[in-house]
Amino acid sequence: MSIVRLLVLGVLELKGPSHGYALQRELQAWNIEAWTKVKPGSIYHALKQLTKENKLSEVGTESSTEGPGRTLYQLTESGLTEFKQLLEQSFLSTEQAELAVAVALMQCLPRSRVLELLQAQVQQLQAYQAGLNQLQPDFTERDSAPHTPDLLALWGSHLQVSQNWTEQLITRIQTGEYCFVDERPKTST
Amino acid sequence: MSIVRLLVLGVLELKGPSHGYALQRELQAWNIEAWTKVKPGSIYHALKQLTKENKLSEVGTESSTEGPGRTLYQLTESGLTEFKQLLEQSFLSTEQAELAVAVALMQCLPRSRVLELLQAQVQQLQAYQAGLNQLQPDFTERDSAPHTPDLLALWGSHLQVSQNWTEQLITRIQTGEYCFVDERPKTST
DNA sequence: ATTTTAGTAGTCAAGTTTGAATACTGGAGC
DNA sequence: GCTCCAGTATTCAAACTTGACTACTAAAAT
């Protein structure tokens, strides 16, 4: 499940029709390179591929005042469905980067759904850590596999960090912080 | 820099000539899936690619008593050079998985070199964290980028965990734990 | 006796990532 | 006026990953 796919769909959902370079800029502004690498080529590939699958449609090739012409893309109906699916999946991913991206885009789901997904993620993290602890005894001899107890300890610490952070995030969401898609449907007047 | 390349070269260095499936089994025994995913296809691709680059050579197709025939591969001179280079690089990588693999294979370098590389890694981690802290002020408003302060905090914690673990590893190496390639050159009698 | 299942060993097409290259514009320096 | 540089916007080949599939053997289940 390519993380770039999710990011491209997510930015298009948040920002509306955009071209490849605009997506790059936006993701740079999010400081995305801190937790995952996103090269220009991957973005353009995702745009082409998603278009081929009718998840996106081209909206003309506007020529701006500066630089060469650029192609705008926008989400289609099925693209929006795909986005929601990928986003839900990412909340349950065991990969740090995917969870981070899911949280970055969480405003696209209703508050209650995000809470459910994050709670499920915490449970997964706990199960995963329990699994690691079960594994430790098998590796107490430092023979066959290289340094596995030390590496398992490192991995366990990372999981613990993720769990603590996610639990704190859940608390903040429960106490009304952040803004979600289903809230304030009528902002005017 | 594919992590699979490094793993394939590393296992061949540690275990001598092996076939694809043996590499899979070995990595499974290391519990590699805990911190990175390695699919069979990637291993076979790496074997083919490295052979094309003369980093490996095929050593006949032995047909074992059980199952179909299998192709043995062994490291060449230039493959060993490649391995050492990739290994040194990985010690300095900003990616968790790469650092973990580097440590798993650290016995292939001399103790003093491993210490140098790990100390450099710690300095990098410190610099990286300093960079993150500088970034925080720019994002105190929750407008443009989604939830960046929270995500930066998560990332920072992960970096801190890595740093602590690496520092403890350095201490253990300094106090004589683990065994390295340059030690006990004469083990017999 | 025969079907199922589990383990061994590997291939392949489709999708994805990477790094380098291209092409065009506007402004800074000479 | 001309060259060089930085920013804008994208393409492409080569390498890599993924998931599903093939094929063969041995032992367990029916």
Image (cartoon, coloured by chain):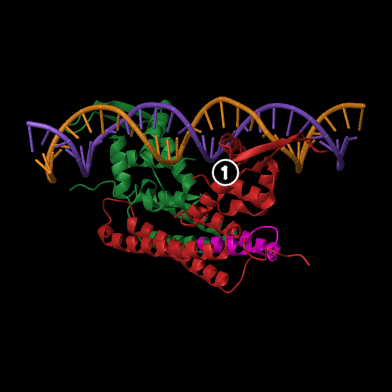
Chain colours: A red, B green, C purple, D orange
Answer with the quarter of the image where residue B22 lies.
Answer: top left
Q: Is residue D2 left or right of residue A158?
A: right
* Vertical position of residue A5 compared to residue D1: above or below: below
Q: Is residue B186 left or right of residue A78?
A: left
Q: Which residue is mark 1?
A: A78
Q: Is residue B146 magenta?
A: yes
Numbered marks: total: 1
Q: Which residues are magenta?
A: B129-158
Q: Position of residue A80 (x, y in %)?
A: 59, 48
- Name the one closer to the observer, D6 or A23: A23
Report in which chain the residue with disc 1 lies. Answer: A
Question: How would you classify the magenta stretch by its main secondary structure?
Answer: helix
Quarter of the image for the C terminus of chain A: give it: bottom right
Q: Position of residue D28 (x, y in %)?
A: 12, 45
Mark 1 is surrounded, within 10 Å at the Cα level, by few (under 14), some (14 to 19) or many (20 or more) other residues, namely few
Q: Is residue B144 magenta?
A: yes
- Note whether residue B185 is visible: yes
Q: Is residue D25 left or right of residue B167?
A: left
Q: Position of residue A168 (x, y in %)?
A: 52, 70
For the point 23% across and 48% down, which residue is it? B187
